[in-house]
Amino acid sequence: MKNILKGIADVVFPPRCMACGAVLIEEGIYFCPDCFARIKFIRSPLCPRCGVPFAETGEQDHICGACLLPGPAFSTARALGRYETALMDVIHKFKYGGKTAVGEKLGKLMAEFPYPAFNIMDYSLIMPVPLHPRKLRQRGFNQSAILAREISRRFSIALDFSSLKRVVFTESQTSLGKEKREINVKAAFAVANPGKVTGQKIILVDDVLTTGSTAKECARMLMKNKAERVAVLTLART
């Protein structure tokens, strides 16, 4: 009966490309061939620490100049793709258009992607970057939590929504430069349940990595509360 109902639904409401809305022929595919081809997935060569991709395709993975200096508290950062074209359009629909079903599909894509030199199963706890309660009321959902939940389900890794808190309401990071972003989020996060963090290998999940200021501050607080290590996994990076 379930298969019959699904078949009827597919006829009446056929699956469509998340980016352009074109009808999809194949089940389990979220983008049409044209939109999929425009997504710039991030693969090697890249910096094995911060995950920044390099332009030359013939290069091997190597530490970037920024990571030769004292680095952030997180040990690794990876992203599915670049924040542009079809991927950016879909993230906007999800984050600002309230399309949470789109977010669930994007979370599945994050869980299925083969990240270079990064294995999700090496970690014991998944955490979304939290929103301040006021921001959560305004938006109605935490986009990072939706992504994190799909990754947690795929790998059966514990998901913690409550230990990491955003305790300071800050202005949007969108229009700020790198230095101001770092100042803006300084001391904006706190760990409410230190015992749940101690000794854990944590994947911190967010939608977009720009300068990394938010991820760095979250990771700093988690490491301060004796996490064993923190990796950052995002849907996209600028």
Image (cartoon, rainbow, N blue to C red):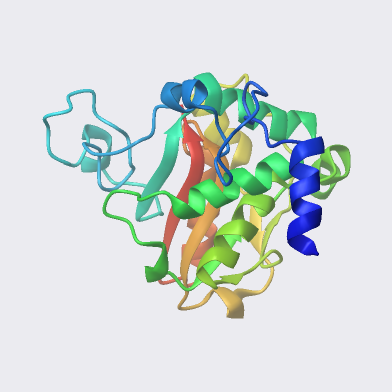
Identify the residue at the far right of this view: 137
Q: Nearer the viewer, residue 129 or 217?
A: 129
Residue 4, how many percent across, how many down? 78, 56
On screen, residue 20 above or below 91: above
Does residue 41 show up? yes
Q: Nearer the viewer, residue 101 or 92?
A: 101
- Left or right, residue 101 beside residue 190: right
Residue at 59% x, 22% y: name it: 176
Residue at 49% x, 35% y: name it: 236
- Left or right, residue 108 beside residue 140: left
Does residue 128 show up? no
Q: Nearer the viewer, residue 149 or 29?
A: 29
On screen, residue 74 above or below 41: below
Quadrant the N terminus occupies? bottom right
Residue 60, how many percent across, how many down? 12, 39
The quarter of the picture where residue 62 lies is top left
Residue at 24% x, 39% y: name it: 44
Residue 51, how many percent across, how many down? 33, 41
On screen, residue 204 above or below 10: below
Image mark count: 0
Residue 87, how many percent across, how many down? 54, 28
